[in-house]
Image (cartoon, rainbow, N blue to C red):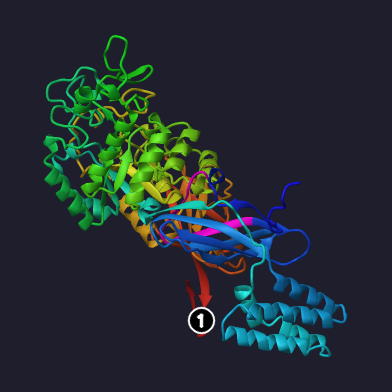
Amino acid sequence: MNEPRPFPGRVTVENVRPRVDLGNFAVKRTLGENIKVEADIFADGHDALSGVVKFRHGKQAAWFEAPMKLVGNDRWVGEFTVTELGTYFYTIEAWINQFQSWQKDLKKRVVAGQTVSVELLVGAVIIEETAARVPAPEADWLKLRARELRNLENSSGGTILKLAMDEELTRLMDRLAERKLPTTDPQEICVAVDSELARFGAWYELFPRSFGTFKDCVAQLPRIAKMGFDVLYLPPIHPIGKSFRKGRNNSVECQPGEPGSPWAIGSDEGGHKSVNPDLGTLADFQTLVAKAREYKIEIALDIALQCAPDHPYVKHHPEWFRHRPDGSIQCAENPPKLYQDIVPFNFECENWPELWQELSSIFEYWIDQKIHVFRVDNPHTKTFAFWEWCLGALKEKNPDLIFLAEAFTRPKVLYRLAKVGFTQSYNYFPWRNTKDELEAYFTELTQPPAADFLRPNLWPNTPDILPQFLQTEDRSAFAIRCILAATLGASYGIYGPAFELCENVPREPGAEEYLNSEKYEIKHWNLAAGWQLEGLLTRLNQIRRANRVLQFNHNLRFHHTDNDQLIAYTKATDDGSDAVLCVVNLSPHYIHSGWLNLPLADFQLDARRTYQMHDLLSDARYLWKGDRNYVELNPARTSAHIFRLRRLVRTEHDFDYFL
């Protein structure tokens, strides 16, 4: 017969949340956020239970604890706050609470009029056992309570319960009593804690060469900062290959003087650790980074792990690439498309450890140049194992790093990239246009399980994507999409002047690519053009910064309207005391109106009293009453309301104002 194992404990802990893929990947949060932990905690019988969330930063050995509370149906909730960047761990411990079990049974017996002399002795013993293991003055105080219990045999039920249920006694026993045979969840769940910029920010993409050099880009910083952007994202700044260089509109024939695609990286002038001499020197780039920080702007650098055919890597390490039977190196392709100016790395080559180390060193080089934010090109065409290894090692040394994945790919691949370490991700927002599409997609993105590991960054356009919604419309279509991006998501971005100036001409009918794309030529933008969206973008970013509820994704909730062209949603605090309501007309052409239903109780609003809707875009104020109100939006004037909910407050002087 097998030897009996140690008694495992009576308490069961199940269904712990948040947890990503059974704990195989980290839950994601940002600095200062609360982690709300839930679990099913139960045991046999009717004893009272207690539980705590145990948590620690990865560099700490000692555990801290936060209490858990029963919220119903054996579901328990507790929370803790992450106060340092890096990795946290948490688990759950639960046990039979002997003292609370005694209190519960004693109360039932007293109410039933039973004799409780023995039960009083049981309680006294429990308290004395605790007093014996704690120092004074708590021990002395507990011993006194135990003696009082022993002397209550002939007391009234009210007197007994007053002492037995004393709040201070209960609090001390909860804190000091021995946890006999506790159950600890064996899994320590990882939480990756990033900077606030990983959760909330506005990105602006700009091709440096269209403005001249790095020095000329410095002159753009005041305008970009005035509009309220937090990140200035630059496409690759490295030397551009000359072999098979693409010409205007992606032509395979490059005319003299055409600059080629910045994503065709590398030539005899250098590779991924060099800057294009046409843009200036490394010192000039460092100056741009420093000047941007003076304006509270982070420079995001594009890292594309691919090469032009004349990249130094191709010459010195041909074994890192795939070769065709004729000996030539295979170019990038996505049949029927061919990218003759780019050759991909073979992440499975025989010398893959050497290759992986070198590719990781590219990030390390630019980190040394004070770059903390990276946009990564086409990560879904590189092996997941590489990203998990590379990003994990980089963030272990530099926990403030941010990696935006250009993951325009299948949903499961997009999700996997987020799980293995990417901080943010592009997504399908450019192609979600109808009310049903937007509501379904953003409910998926902003609620668990996706919300625990994926942070969407919403872009209405990119140099690669000119959505059809923007192609045949005027300024109102661009206004609709940037309002949606800025309010549905905590992070959003625009492909700079092209979006500001409402550029909307496709390469050909039905294509979602720009005619005369900046990817293949130098543009000379007229920032004084009449359709400029600078004013709207500036106001949106002001609203986002002034209203903290817009800086999160998990608090997004949609509300019913009786018109499919009107979409309504709120972002609010957990108790609803602070809330912003957005109503957007999804049609760029027509006036649309309808009735909006708002659950007033969720926002601490009284259905019998008037409340004010303050439109933060126009500064107009409307008085609403009840949970059903009328809205009308004319895209010729404005495509949206962004309302701050203000409730009526009456002072002691009988003066009313809206809070």
Q: Nearer the viewer, residue 349 or 79?
A: 349
Q: In the image, which residues are magenta?
A: 24-39
Q: Quadrant of residue 235?
A: top left
Measured from the top left, where is residue 498 in percent x and y?
Answer: 28, 38
What number of labels is visible? Answer: 1
Q: Quadrant of residue 348?
A: top left
Q: As displayed, is residue 310 above or below residue 358?
A: above
Left or right of 172, for residue 359: left
Q: Nearer the viewer, residue 87 or 5?
A: 5
Measured from the top left, where is residue 283 in percent x and y?
Answer: 12, 46
Q: Nearer the viewer, residue 341 or 545?
A: 341
Q: Quadrant of residue 226?
A: bottom left
Measured from the top left, where is residue 419 in percent x and y?
Answer: 46, 42
Left or right of 404, for residue 515: left
Which residue: 12% across, 36% down?
277
Is 28 magenta? The answer is yes
Q: Nearer the viewer, residue 501 or 179?
A: 179
Helix, strand, or loop for circle 1?
A: loop
Which residue: 33% across, 22% down?
508
Q: As displayed, is residue 254 above or below residue 500?
A: above
Predominant secondary structure, magenta span? strand
**Can you see residue 49?**
yes
Q: Mark 1 — residue?
A: 651
Is 365 magenta? The answer is no
Measured from the top left, where is residue 141 in percent x and y?
Answer: 62, 87
| Furthest-top residue in this view | 326
| Amino acid type assigned to the residue bearing label 1 in the image | Thr
**Can you see residue 623?**
no
Q: Is the residue marked by circle 1 packed among few (<14), some (14-19), or many (20+) residues within 10 Å?
A: few
